Image (spheres, coloured by chain):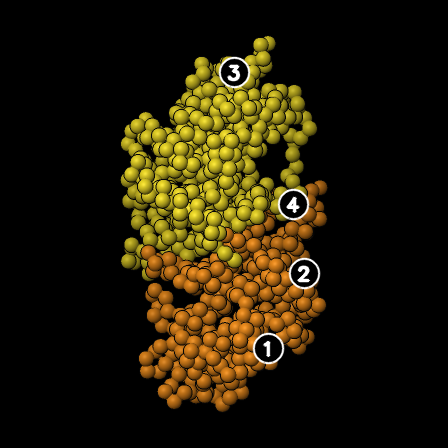
Amino acid sequence: MNLELTDEQSFLRDAARDALSRVKTIALAREALEDPSVLPDLWPTACEAGWPGLLVREESGGAGLSAFDAMLVMTEAGRVLAGVQLLGHLPASELLDDGGWDRIEAVAEGELRACFVAARPPGDLDTRWTVEPPSGSVRLDAPVLAADGTLNGSVAWVPDAPRADVYVVVAVGAGDGAPVAVAVEAGADGVLVESATRYDATRSLGHVTFDGALAGVLPAAGAEAIERAWYLAQALIAAESLGAVETALTVSVAYAKERFTFGRAIGSYQAVKHSLTEVLRLRENTYALLLYAGWAYEDGPREFALAASAARTAGGHALDYASRAMISVHGGIGATWEHDAPLFFRRAQLSRRLLGGIGDSADRVAGELMGAA
Amino acid sequence: MDLNDTPEQAQYRAKVRAWLEEHKHEAPPEQGQDEATHVAARRAWQGTLAAAGLAGVTWPAELGGQGLGPVEHVIVSQEIGLTGVPGILDVIGVGMLGPTIIAHGSDEQKNRFLGPMLHGDEIWCQLFSEPAAGSDLAAVQARAVAQDDGGWLLSGQKVWTTNAHFAAYGLLLARTDADVPKHKGLTMFVVPMDAEGVTIRGLRQISGEAEFNEVFFDDVRLEADAVVGGVANGWGTALTTLMFERLTIGLGSDGLGYKAERYAAAIATDEHARRDPEVRRRLGELCTELLAVKFTGYRMLSALQQGQIPGPEAGLAKITTVRAAIEAGDLIADVLGPDALDADSEWAYMISFLPGLKSAGGTEEILRNTIGERVLGLPPEPRLDKGIAFSELRAKERAAAVTS
């Protein structure tokens, strides 16, 4: 048994940390709340580091790395609230590779930005493939692929949709309702993308509508690959949350050591100490579950849905708790515009509600376990 | 990332499995009706396991062990679990007290005590906690007074003592000098449980069962050679035991049976509950925590294989396990109704056991203090017990309790 990072993984992580440190991402996350145009496009950084092709096979021009490697990069992005657009790109790149898409090399190199327009796979209760609704709690049916190869339907709150060049859409066939992955060019007739950024300026989101758009079927990407892409996105957003949790913890611990009240450092009070220990506990749980997801993706595919859903649930709760603790430990200043804590709170608030949300992932954990019982 | 055995480990596992398959018919049931018969059978089974090299796996070979690593220990535990036979009876002795004697005991003590301990011929108990010294273990008040002939006279009370009522020996932490600060005046002793002046009383818990004991010592006479690890070195000796306690719990937490799959299966039997969104959310969240504990265990094992010893952060997994299992008991009882609390129910014992488990091995609150200070590096709680003699500290505590 060996769950330590390999030398290559440590290098990948350190290189990511270094590359992202060259931009003041956290300060810009604040400025962008008032002026979104200040936010730099980090895609060139991602391309230089080789991240767009992380999950693409070497024979298709990628690096052929594992899902856990991608999680390491996502953790570094989350650590500094960097919007690197990999949440949309990575699951899409994998489906395009599986599907034998002819321009996969351009995707691996980052010349083309791909975007995963996700649909949630059926569970033990809901047998449909469903997508995020623009509002409310009722999930909508996935877009429908007609016999003539045109796509109809809409999906709300799609991560990284606004700047994408190609959409990888999970649709269902008009005849049989079977899932199918299709590629749709941005800018094609019948494709409408409405930017939908909310609350966290670093998170690029869009509502995507297909109205008779011409879609290229990726026949080699079967139901299993389509399902796996959803859970990969769950694991990636969990990894991104882990990074934000780690920053929140580090910053809060440092402050608890240097801020004094009643003659004592506030970190010596049990109430503060226990709250920070709780952040650590949730952090450790999330990391352990990311290891589970990384292992399952490679060696235990039947457990990947369970592992990724558990990681998502743990990561979402961890960031929720950590960002609130960060505010509380800093006292009143933690709730002001000057401090970074609100930026992490904004990240937590939005993230937990994307891609099905953490209520859904908890439900999926229960469903997977009861289904196996 | 690799969860698989190395070829050598796989070979060892196969050997262990083959032995267990061949001998499982000799194993007694996990629980028996009559305790005396059950304990005798479990002791004999421990002897059988020890003879086969399946007890004391990490003990040095020259002291009767196998001289193997923690991974082999875990392999044996896993295979015993999979075969469905009980493990050794004296987990506390072989897992914690034996290793303490190995580390700190004299050659005479090692020769006299380790063999019978390993084979289940003599069961051991841990006499550390007291009514007023649990999480603050160094506050023990049991007193051993040196006699002119080199022996000791022991008085005081211990509590939470598992297996005391059928133990042959106990490892006891006593105060031998009250005029120095509290950590400095302690000494560790071997105490024969059948000595004159030892009284053992069962301590019933919420469930109604008495799994622990209170043990009273009334002028119990100990020989000079009962000291383990030197006079006034008791705290250092105790820390060794506590380190092995962490290891035993960390490597054996799966054995508690607090498993996501088991709880999910229980809920799944209720057709309405398994579709209820609120039930599913609660189940999903508590199972998420238990799955995390499972992989935290693998992380610990992986670290051990790289030669790292688990630090206090290992305690977080215990906190998570207890929290999640409490949630599970609540959820299952909410779904099944009062029948879940019936003495015959599969769940009543667990529900009754967990509130106490929260404080076992140190309360959750103190554990969080320790982790906050030692792992996160947060400043310590202000302490009033540093640098003053234990007798003076006690006098101050009594005065404060009276005036407040």
Judged from this view, the residue extending furthest toward the top is B148
Residue corresponding to mark 2: A339
**Tag 1–tag 4 contact (CB < 8 Å):** no
Please, what is the three-letter code of the amino acid marked with disc 4? Leu
Mark 1 chain: A
Check if mark 1 and mark 2 are on a common chain: yes
Q: Is residue B277 or residue A47 the one in the foreground?
A: A47
Q: Report the mark closest to the observer, 2 or 4.
A: 4
Please, what is the three-letter code of the amino acid marked with disc 2? His
Asked if one can make out residue B368 in the rendered structure from this viewpoint, the answer is no
Chain A, which colour?
orange
Residue corresponding to mark 4: B378
Cα distance, mark 3 to mark 2? 64 Å
**Which circle's residue, 1 or 2, is located before the other in the chain?**
1
Q: Report the mark closest to the observer, 3 or 2.
A: 3
Q: Position of residue A227 (x, y in %)?
A: 42, 70
Cα distance, mark 3 to mark 1? 78 Å
Task: Tell me what residue is drawn at x 56 percent, y 16 percent.
Answer: B224
Cα distance, mark 1 to mark 2? 37 Å
Cα distance, mark 3 to mark 4? 43 Å
Mark 2 chain: A
The 10 Å Cα crowd at callout 3, few under 14, some 14 to 19, many 20 or more, is many
Residue corresponding to mark 3: B222
Please, what is the three-letter code of the amino acid marked with disc 3? Leu
The 10 Å Cα crowd at callout 2, few under 14, some 14 to 19, many 20 or more, is some
Quadrant position of the C terminus of chain A in the picture: bottom left
